[in-house]
Image (tube, helix red, strand yellow):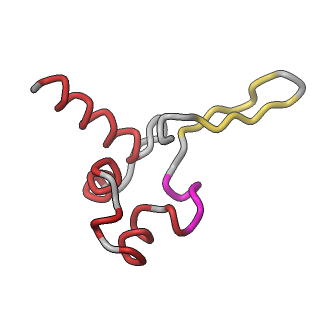
Amino acid sequence: MYAQEILFEDESKVVSRKPLMAKDLPYEDQPRNKLALYGAACLSNTELLALLIGQGTREESELRLAEKVLKAYRDWE
């Protein structure tokens, strides 16, 4: 879910590609709001780590960075 990108197309031409940011998710699916509404037990490890990361870069969202960290950790084990 978080690895996908939003594509803006104009007549079969990609105008812009940007990573899916937490703020682009529906209100109740944004990690910070989900935490406030439902508690930490309802968040995935990726969402919890994304909250600690805070914000991403222009190229990658905090959610994608969290996925990469968790994948790297799993590969390291």
Residue found 40% across the figure and 39% down from its top: 64
Residue found 39% across the figure and 74% down from its top: 38
Q: Nearer the viewer, residue 58 or 23?
A: 23
From the top left corner, tell me how far across and down residue 26 is, in percent: 59, 62
Q: Main secondary structure of the magenta part?
A: helix
Q: Nearer the viewer, residue 11 or 35?
A: 35
Most distant residue in the right direction:
11
Q: Within the image, what quadrant is residue 74 found in?
A: top left
In this rendering, the answer to whether 36 lies above or below 67 is below
Residue found 25% across the figure and 36% down from its top: 69
From the top left corner, tell me how far across and down residue 7 is, in percent: 69, 34
Looking at the image, residue 71 sits to the left or right of residue 6; the answer is left
From the top left corner, tell me how far across and down residue 41 is, in percent: 28, 66
Q: Within the image, what quadrant is residue 33 found in?
A: bottom left
Most distant residue in the bottom direction:
37
Looking at the image, how many numbered discs can be counted on the residues?
A: 0
- On whether residue 56 falls in the magenta region, the answer is no
Q: Nearer the viewer, residue 20 or 48?
A: 48
Residue found 59% across the figure and 37% down from its top: 18
The magenta stretch is: 22-27
Looking at the image, residue 22 sits to the left or right of residue 69; the answer is right
